[in-house]
Image (cartoon, rainbow, N blue to C red):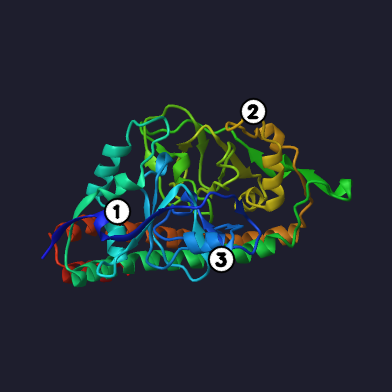
């Protein structure tokens, strides 16, 4: 038997997060931000740390079962169920909901991904300012039908099985990238080589914004900035729209965000989801990087995401505060050591095999996510029973 409740009524606590700065290298608690909840799980190994006092940790610490919701910007209303196994706190642009004991928090998180929630968000957040926002009290007023605790848990288990598999695939992809990163680091990128004669400019190995023909489709594939990953190589989502300009790219290219704060947030992705010969479009704020002939395609991605290159790019940003950019011309001056041909060949073989594995898991994740998104409204409305949903889940797991 369902009951009509509000988000505030099922919550034991509702809190805004901590105002502080992220620290990439540190021994403080993890610092969860809006940019860290882009997927259906939190990739904790890439979440930065922060400095927080014991009192702040006690007040803002996340527990498994908490639900966080973005309250500002283009991500307003985006929610995430939290599973954590190390100290972590959450940022001020997130709101934390901690559920009462007789409600399943993961079920509530799925409610906050449903169409009624999105409608509620649009109604209270749209048009407030150029930067949409939503208060905790506005979130708490959201009403929904809540079934029995047993039914909540059953629905959460079915949908959670799909999200758990997605998370496991991401973990495998991260391990593959870490292995390649370790190999890549044996050839050190260095903007100030000690032996000038053994150095190259970036453009000796990588083309920047290569000339690409116009797409042939009326509505070509388009990748906007919100779809760009902040961790991992895979671009997991894209759309299509009429061809109206923008960066042009094809399979094997790396897309690098050149504007603040996207560059600082490491928005970088490798293109491997197009058909042979297909041309796609993206934001004008991308720099397209393509390995030159004889250089492994994946090589440009590892340069773009290396710490030395990122530091160089960020240091060369210019423009007004809040709208700073780095130009392709500035990046062209980045200095690299000359890679050994035999190492390049070996790296290319390993990278090709592991990137193919990551691509296959990315494609599987898209199928899993599509299944979850199709089941979500039917389960929430009671149009299908959990047992029937379990059968559909078994078909894709």
Sequence order check: which comes first, mark 1 or mark 2?
1
Depth-wise, is mark 3 or mark 1 nearer the camera?
A: 1
Is residue 329 placed above or below 301 in the rendered structure? above
- Location of the N terminus by quadrant is bottom left
Question: x and y percent of residue 12 in the render?
Answer: 32, 62
User: Looking at the image, can residue 254 be seen?
Assistant: yes
Mark 2 surroundings: few (<14), some (14-19) or many (≥20) residues within 10 A? few
Position of 4 with respect to 33 (left or right) is left
Question: x and y percent of residue 11 in the render?
Answer: 30, 60
Position of 68 with respect to 19 (left or right) is left
Figure quadrant of residue 360: bottom left
Marks 3/1: CA–CA distance: 32 Å
Pick the front one: 296 or 240: 240
Q: Residue at x 51, y 52 (%)?
A: 18
Pick the front one: 323 or 104: 104
- Please give the residue where the numbered disc 3 appears in the rendered image: 176
- Location of the C terminus by quadrant is bottom left
Sequence order check: which comes first, mark 3 or mark 1?
1
Q: Secondary structure at mark 1?
A: loop
Q: Secondary structure at mark 2?
A: loop
Depth-wise, is mark 2 or mark 3 nearer the camera?
A: 2
Q: Secondary structure at mark 3?
A: helix
Pick the front one: 298 or 138: 138
Q: Residue at x 14, y 60 (%)?
A: 3
Marks 1/2: CA–CA distance: 38 Å
Q: Residue at x 49, y 52 (%)?
A: 91
Q: What is the number of the mark on residue 218? A: none
Q: What is the number of the mark on residue 319? A: 2
Mark 1 surroundings: few (<14), some (14-19) or many (≥20) residues within 10 A? many
- Please give the residue where the numbered disc 1 appears in the rendered image: 112
Sequence order check: which comes first, mark 2 or mark 3?
3
């Amino acid at each position: 038997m369902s009951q009509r409740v509000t988000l505030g009524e099922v919550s034991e606590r509702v809190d805004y997060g901590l105002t502080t700065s992220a620290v990439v290298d540190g021994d403080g608690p993890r610092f969860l931000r809006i940019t860290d909840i882009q997927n259906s799980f939190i990739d904790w190994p890439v979440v930065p740390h922060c400095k927080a006092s014991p009192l702040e940790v006690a007040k803002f610490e996340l527990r498994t079962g908490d639900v966080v919701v973005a309250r500002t910007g283009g991500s307003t209303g985006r929610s995430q169920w939290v599973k954590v196994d190390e100290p972590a706190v959450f940022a001020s642009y997130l709101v934390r909901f901690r559920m009462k004991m007789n409600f399943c928090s993961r079920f509530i998180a799925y409610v906050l991904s449903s169409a009624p929630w999105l409608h509620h968000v649009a109604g209270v957040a749209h048009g407030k300012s150029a930067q949409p926002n939503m208060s905790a009290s506005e979130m708490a007023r959201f009403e929904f039908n809540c079934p029995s605790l047993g039914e909540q848990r059953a629905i959460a288990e079915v949908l959670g099985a799909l999200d758990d598999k997605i998370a496991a695939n991401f973990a495998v992809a991260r391990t593959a990238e870490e292995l390649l990163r370790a190999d890549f680091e044996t050839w050190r990128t260095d903007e100030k080589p000690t032996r000038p004669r053994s150095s190259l400019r970036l453009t000796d190995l990588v083309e920047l914004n290569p000339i690409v023909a116009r797409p042939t489709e009326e509505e070509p594939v388009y990748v906007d900035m919100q779809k760009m990953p902040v961790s991992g190589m895979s671009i997991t989502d894209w759309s299509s729209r009429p061809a109206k300009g923008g960066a042009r790219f094809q399979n094997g290219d790396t897309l690098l965000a050149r504007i603040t704060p996207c560059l600082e947030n490491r928005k970088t992705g490798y293109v491997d989801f197009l058909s042979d010969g297909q041309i796609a479009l993206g934001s004008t704020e991308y720099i397209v990087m393509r390995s030159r002939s004889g250089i492994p395609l994946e090589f440009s991605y590892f340069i773009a995401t290396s710490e030395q290159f990122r530091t160089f790019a960020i240091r060369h940003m210019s423009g007004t505060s809040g709208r700073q950019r780095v130009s392709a011309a500035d990046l062209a001056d980045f200095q690299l050591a000359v890679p050994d041909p035999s190492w390049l060949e070996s790296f290319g073989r390993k990278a090709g095999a592991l990137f193919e594995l990551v691509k296959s898991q990315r494609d599987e994740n898209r199928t899993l996510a599509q299944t979850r998104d199709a089941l979500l409204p039917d389960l929430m409305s009671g149009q299908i029973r959990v047992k029937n949903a379990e059968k559909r889940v078994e078909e894709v797991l």
